[in-house]
């Protein structure tokens, strides 16, 4: 009987570890003051499928709040994460020193970004807490004024936020820059109801060695490329600060707390690095997106072209390099589910990945409705949508509309936001015209028809960039 109980406990623990693999371990709101180390820390958190960035707040510190807002928005746009809410803290009286490195380094294309339209951070946080019921970690990469004001203005904030993770010089250091952005707020928050984890560097340890930069360069990820580009820039090389780990320690702490020495002070604690080997490997692991299991049965899909059929083989590297592994894997699985290579299944894959990218979500995190109907070939889009988003009829997250004129359009609802993606009419017309012509000449029962459909599908998979082929409309 004892053996049986031991087996049941072990099995239940194993199931607990494997359950809901699509649900991230960390739901975070990030408060940043615009330092270049913030850019790297935010990029790392966006890179990890085990972190869900719910919103980012622009606060004064290294830069004034409006300049910080421009940096954040340009960064998110460069990653096509346009749907992540960005709020601004205009209530702080801190006058920024406008550090030259932070001011002059561009996080993305800043043209057309108007901070005067930015939403107040309190409103952004209130909305997040209305729709997200998972306990949140509040990440502070600058001062603590946004936290202190949120505790005062939002009644549910103290119960909804499980911890504040603060990048600073430690709980006892009253002279540090982040502490003195708003000294009064720092003192109040440190004695307040929410535990504070003070993540701080241990001396000036050079982290960004040539080896780390070369290994970062080899990662096929926009987040890795962004960090590598910065570290190789003349601005970074001329500034010793850029070779150290500062705010980047926060995402490392979130993922690898065992690599930090933790010294408690009441409910708060100082967290300092203690295992640099784990942190170096962890840094690369985060940027690789290798922080969770990606699949349920197989460990991974090979990226070696020789694994695939001869007609697919020449496309593998091009598609992965251009569009990333998420689109490649979803495309392979969708076409296996679909039982043939079909262009509208590929369109569905690209549409679903683009929607996930917009909101920066994983699978199974939003509702989708497809206007593609139930009549092939257009309805083939539904198979691509299911695989790329995890929004399946079985999960109750995908609805196929049959009471409207079928068209390559889908709507996605995440929290309180509705997004509509439509395949551009000229592309839809070209695809439909080709399929009709092949059908007219050869007929659906001809092997030649399916061979030509397969050939065209591979070409469209390689040539159609998901960032260019959809019209995107924000409904609310």
Image: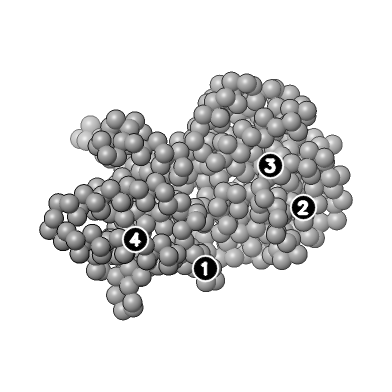
Label 3 and label 1: CA atoms lie apart by 30 Å
Q: Which mark sits nearer the N-terminus, 2 or 4?
A: 2
Q: Secondary structure at mark 2?
A: helix
The N terminus lies in quadrant: top left
Q: Which mark sits nearer the N-terminus, 2 or 1?
A: 2
Q: Which mark sits nearer the N-terminus, 4 or 1?
A: 4
Q: Secondary structure at mark 4?
A: helix
Q: Which mark sits nearer the N-terminus, 2 or 3?
A: 3
Residue occupying the point 71% across, 44% down:
106
Label 2 and label 3: CA atoms lie apart by 14 Å
Depth order, front residue of 134/51 = 51
Q: State whether residue 74 is above or below residue 17.
A: below
Residue linked to disc 2: 67
Residue linked to disc 3: 38
Q: Disc 2, disc 3: CB below 8 Å?
A: no
Q: Disc 3, disc 1: CB below 8 Å?
A: no
Residue occupying the point 28% across, 48% down:
455
Q: Secondary structure at mark 1?
A: strand
Residue linked to disc 1: 473
Q: Which mark sits nearer the N-terminus, 3 or 1?
A: 3
The picture places residue 179, in percent across and down from the top left corner, at 79, 42
Q: Residues within 10 Å of mark 1 (few under 14, many from 20)?
A: few
Label 2 and label 1: CA atoms lie apart by 27 Å
Q: Nearer the viewer, mark 3 or mark 1?
A: 1
Q: Residues within 10 Å of mark 4 (few under 14, many from 20)?
A: some
The picture places residue 24, in percent across and down from the top left corner, at 46, 47
Query: Which label number is shown at residue 431?
Result: 4
Q: Disc 3, disc 4: CB below 8 Å?
A: no
């Amino acid at each position: 009987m004892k053996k049986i109980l031991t087996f049941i406990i072990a099995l239940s623990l194993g199931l607990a570890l494997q359950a809901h693999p699509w649900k991230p371990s960390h739901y975070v709101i990030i408060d940043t003051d615009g330092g270049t180390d913030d850019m790297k820390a935010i990029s790392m958190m966006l890179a990890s499928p085990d972190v869900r960035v719910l919103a980012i707040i622009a606060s004064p510190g290294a830069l004034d709040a409006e300049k910080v807002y421009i940096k954040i928005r340009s960064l998110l746009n460069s990653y096509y994460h346009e749907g992540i809410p960005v709020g601004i803290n205009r209530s702080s009286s801190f006058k920024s020193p406008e550090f030259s490195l932070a001011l002059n380094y561009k996080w993305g294309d800043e043209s057309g970004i108007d901070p005067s339209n930015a939403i107040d951070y309190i409103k952004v946080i209130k909305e997040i807490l209305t729709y997200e019921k998972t306990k949140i970690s509040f990440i502070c990469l600058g001062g603590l004024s946004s936290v202190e004001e949120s505790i005062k203005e939002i009644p549910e904030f103290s119960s909804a936020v499980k911890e504040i993770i603060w990048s600073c010089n430690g709980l006892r250091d009253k002279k540090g820059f982040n502490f003195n952005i708003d000294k009064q707020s720092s003192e109040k928050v440190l004695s307040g109801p929410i535990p504070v984890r003070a993540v701080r560097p241990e001396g000036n340890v050079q982290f960004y060695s040539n080896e780390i930069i070369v290994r970062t360069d080899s990662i096929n990820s926009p987040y890795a490329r962004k960090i590598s580009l910065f570290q190789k820039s003349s601005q970074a090389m001329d500034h010793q600060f850029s070779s150290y780990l500062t705010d980047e320690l926060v995402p490392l702490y979130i993922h690898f707390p065992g690599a930090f020495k933790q010294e408690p002070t009441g409910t708060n604690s100082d967290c300092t690095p203690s295992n640099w080997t784990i942190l170096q490997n962890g840094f690369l692991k985060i940027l690789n997106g290798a922080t969770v299991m990606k699949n349920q049965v197989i460990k991974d899909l090979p990226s070696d072209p020789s694994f695939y059929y001869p007609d697919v083989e020449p496309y593998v590297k091009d598609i992965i390099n251009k569009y990333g592994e998420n689109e490649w894997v979803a495309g392979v699985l969708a076409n296996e589910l679909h039982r043939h290579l079909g262009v509208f299944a590929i369109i569905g894959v690209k549409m679903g990945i683009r929607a996930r990218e917009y909101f920066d979500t994983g699978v199974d995190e939003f509702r989708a409705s497809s206007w593609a109907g139930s009549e092939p070939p257009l309805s083939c889009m539904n198979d691509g949508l299911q695989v790329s988003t995890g929004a399946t009829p079985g999960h109750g997250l995908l609805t196929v509309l049959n009471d409207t004129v079928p068209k390559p359009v889908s709507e996605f609802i995440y929290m309180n936001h509705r997004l509509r993606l439509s395949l551009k009419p000229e592309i839809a017309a070209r695809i439909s015209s080709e399929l009709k012509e092949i059908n007219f000449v050869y007929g659906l029962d001809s092997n030649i028809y399916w061979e030509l459909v397969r050939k065209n599908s591979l070409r469209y998979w390689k040539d159609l960039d998901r960032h260019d082929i959809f019209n995107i409309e924000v409904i609310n």
